[in-house]
Amino acid sequence: MAESPAATGSGAGRRRRATATAAAWGGWGGRPQPQNILLQLRQGQLTGRGLVRSVQFPETFLAERDKQSKWSGLPQLLLKLYSTSHLHSDFIECQNILKLLVEILMRPTISIRGQKLKISDEMSKDCLSILYNTCVCTEGVTKRLAEKNEFVIFLFTLMTSKKTFLQTATLIEDILGVKKEMIRLDEVPNLSSLVSNFDQQQLANFCRILAVTISEMDTGNDDKHTLLAKNAQQKKSLSLGPSAAEINQAALLSIPGFVERLCKLATRKVSESTGTASFLQELEEWYTWLDNALVLDALMRVANEESEHSQASIVFPPPGASEENGLPHTSTRTQLPQSMKIMHEIMYKLEVLYVLCVLLMGRQRNQVHRMIAEFKLIPGLNNLFDKLIWRKHSASALVLHGHNQNCDCSPDITLKIQFLRLLQSFSDHHENKYLLLNNQELNELSAISLKANIPEVEAVLNTDRSLVCDGKRGLLTRLLQVMKKEPAESSFRFWQARAVESFLRGTTSYADQMFLLKRGLLEHILYCIVDSECKSRDVLQSYFDLLGELMKFNVDAFKRFNKYINTDAKFQVFLKQINSSLVDSNMLVRCVTLSLDRFENQVDMKVAEVLSECRLLAYISQVPTQMSFLFRLINIIHVQTLTQENVSCLNTSLVILMLARRKERLPLYLRLLQRMEHSKKYPGFLLNNFHNLLRFWQQHYLHKDKDSTCLENSSCISFSYWKETVSILLNPDRQSPSALVSYIEEPFMDIDRDFTEE
């Protein structure tokens, strides 16, 4: 679902970042000062302007100055690099020069007569600057550097020095962004010591690199997202052992205090801005040309150095120089650092939340969950919710220059989405989800169970009250409040619904459902589906999934539904939304079907009243309706196109048939499917497809404990009954009235197709 905040590729974004980096590394200090040759060279290598003037110096002059100042031949190399980096120039010569730069950079790894050569931090910075900007400006350089695994690992060692940290991290980030094979962090010398010695600012920026190293590599081929391909990859992985990403996650979790420091970074409070409106204007202005937190660090360092020397000037050159170098005009010296600090926190939290989110979804999930709870990440985020994560700002502040209001590029918007993704990962099928509530809200859950005369949820009783949210509202309640205020076409709606749905997923809890129903969630969802006639398929899918979890087996929810959908016109709009895409709405169809089956087997006046009045239950109870859903669900999926998203259609079709089997109506449903096939003038096409789908189902689910547990918990049907039903349907005996083959005529039989992927 989302994407890794990894290194950016080539294009306008990288060129803009290179310009900003050039400004940051140029060492400007406010007032214009005379520049020596080295400064001109540095500005030339970074901005591309001063270099033109520097090449006017004779090569003999540069060589003499090089000898006096011990520049290790950098001026001459830079001159040659300039002459070989134009279009149609000799790229091989350019590569040879870069090879020399790499050798200069790696001198500390070389020993002569037992002594290691030394290189100054300033020299390392210059080499890194040249390499980085050559990567940005010359196609193919980054890939060539990425091929040298020894060099990439060596770069990590340069991050031990604060003077070279920013330049090194920026270069590593770009190299890892194009590297075909992921590096292994356990190969980095003294990784634990390196990371432990980072200050909080360095650790936050290091998370940009970690985002690449702990995420499974994506091939970019949509076919590789099919379940067939994933299963094949999993079989291959079992023989190869843990992936590089999994090894890297384990390496990080073995570092003492690593997760604790990430939690502190994520929940660190931001200094209050003196003027919110002016800050937001500044934020927009800066972000139009800054898209790298590392650049901000360089700028912050310059600002801090200015402050230490008690200079009252602006961090950057005066207006004329600012315009010449492509930099935005700033206001006063005292305003800039404050804005930068706030921007820092936003960008830092983006990277940190992403890393925590990936770790939460990894093999060590339970370990990460335990640590995140212990270090109070959730109550910390709750305290930041209003002031930072979902702070109020004008509509204009949401739109950045060169972007539209639906763009997800701004740091504010990206922070919200990453925050919601973290909540989704944190709550999904884990008892720690109750940490999203405060003590009063936990007591409310207990009161709901007591009133309904049902046992309290064990996870609620086991929740450590010292780790829950504090304040008047917990994080879940705060999320519900902003969710109901979200504009109709907001892209946040999808992520908000997913985060809330994850709280409900797993074994159905009446108390959890009522907690959300009392806060008007069902009415809000129905308003979005029916009255606002939402058009976004992603948002509709997330709302249908949430509605299904909210209503499943809950009589009170169906009463509320019927009260809101109180006219035939509204009900028809609702049905139109359901039928417009069953891939999006099938989870709701499944939940309503399961609820209907349970209600029909209960003897209760309240349930009987709902069964007689609810339009939705009456609609689903009709056999023609169930057959229509069943036919379409089977017809829209095939083994070769099954994904994690649409495999739910297969499971929903199975739920319909399992419930029919309970009522001894399975042969009837199969016979009706056969008739529907013939009415379409294509006998066998549906049942053959269903047979292949069920064969795949057996391969997929009988070897995956997690998926089978999810099926059992969400349906309240034992997994053994799922397996039995599939086996009965796949029975090869054509005399069996419950076997699919009994309803496929011999000339149209096509059930032994090999669907395995090489």
Image (cartoon, helix red, strand yellow):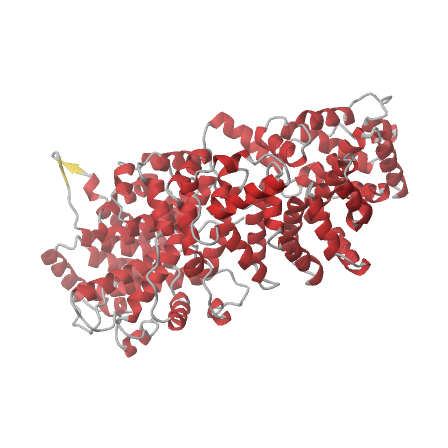
Residue 756 in view of the camera? yes
- In this rendering, would 435 be left or right of 133? right
Q: Position of residue 746 (x, y in %)?
A: 87, 28
Q: Is residue 506 left or right of residue 362?
A: right
Numbered disc total: 0
Residue for point 89% across, 38% down: 675
Q: Is residue 148 visible?
A: no
Residue 384 in the image, given as x and y percentages of width and height: 41, 56
In the visual, does 229 lie left or right of 335? right
State which quadrant residue 18 falls in: bottom left
* Residue 668 percent across, percent down from the top left: 87, 32
Going 44% across and 63% down the picture, which residue do you hit?
A: 12
At 60% from the left edge and 26% from the top edge, which residue is drawn? 703
Q: Left or right? Give the position of 666 relative to 256.
A: right
Q: Is residue 267 above or below residue 607?
A: below
Front one among 45 and 270: 270
Residue 745 versus residue 554: which sits nearer the camera?
Answer: 554
Check the picture and name the quadrant holding the C terminus: top right
Q: Residue furthest left?
A: 68
Q: Is residue 753 above or below residue 608?
A: above
**Residue appearing at x 61%, y 36% in the figure:** 507
Residue 642 image offset from top left, x and y in percent: 66, 39
